[in-house]
């Protein structure tokens, strides 16, 4: 083989090595968002006529220091399997989102689950139904349905870092 033949083989090979090194460096520099659990479990508790939510943090596990706790705003991703664990510390509550066809009870000393997948992005009122013990209607919170990408960004911006 001639020297020019070696150069003809080596130049494309060096070019591929260079490009693969650039790709790896670019992927390391981009911030990666965590994957959502399947299903994503969120604990929702009725306390003093307000819904309190506890979402898993960036580690994806409930009951750890990075959990995200909110009052009267329940953030959930659309097009993802979701499981709500419903609790109450004081009264009988109904978790109801008529626009998404969701309805389940929350009672003291019992756990109820609600499995679903939100279809559309938006913000929905969580209205106190008569069973809550109030005669007049009141808003106990809002369900914020966002795209999975927006949900992961919300987790990252809201969550605690270790």
Image (tube, grey):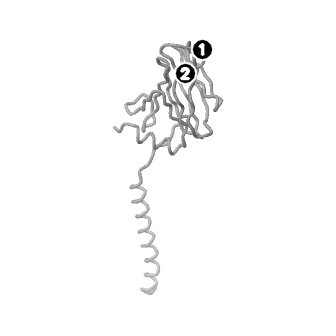
Mark 1, Cα crowd under 10 Å, few <14 / some 14-19 / many 20+, is few
Q: Residue furthest front?
A: 136
x then y, percent, for residue 39: 55, 34
Q: Residue at x 60, y 19 (%)?
A: 129
Left or right: where 162 falls relative to 62: left
- In the rendered image, the residue lying farthest to the right is 101
- Mark number, residue 153: none
Picture residue at 41% right of the left edge, 32% below the top? 67
Which label is found at residue 131?
Answer: 1
Q: Quick check: 109 above or below 116?
A: above
- The residue shown at (56%, 12%) is 133
The picture places residue 18, in percent across and down from the top left corner, at 41, 69
- Give coordinates of residue 86: x percent, y percent: 53, 22
Q: Is mark 1 on a helix, strand or loop?
A: helix
Instruction: Specify which label sits upstream in the sequence, 1 or 2.
Output: 1
Residue 105 relative to residue 17: left or right = right
| Percent coordinates x, y for residue 108 in the rendering | 51, 13
Q: Quadrant of the C terminus?
A: top left
- For residue 52, side relative to residue 129 (left or right): left
Q: Is residue 35 above or below residue 41?
A: below
Secondary structure state at the residue bearing disc 2: loop
Q: Pointer 2: what residue?
A: 138
């Amino acid at each position: 083989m001639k020297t020019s033949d070696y150069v003809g083989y080596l130049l494309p090979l060096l070019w591929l090595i260079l490009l693969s090194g650039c790709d790896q460096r670019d992927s390391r520099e981009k911030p990666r968002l965590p994957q959502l659990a399947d299903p994503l479990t969120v604990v929702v508790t009725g306390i003093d006529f307000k819904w309190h939510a506890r979402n898993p943090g960036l580690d994806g596990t409930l009951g750890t220091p990075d959990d995200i706790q909110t009052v009267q705003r329940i953030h959930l991703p659309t097009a993802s399997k979701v499981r709500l664990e419903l609790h109450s510390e004081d009264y009988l509550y109904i978790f109801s989102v008529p626009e998404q066809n969701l309805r389940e009870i929350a009672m003291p000393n019992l756990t109820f689950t609600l499995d679903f997948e939100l279809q559309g992005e938006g913000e929905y009122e969580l209205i106190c139904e008569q069973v809550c013990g109030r005669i007049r209607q009141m808003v106990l919170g809002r369900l914020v349905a966002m795209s999975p990408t927006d949900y992961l960004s919300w987790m990252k911006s809201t969550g605690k870092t270790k």
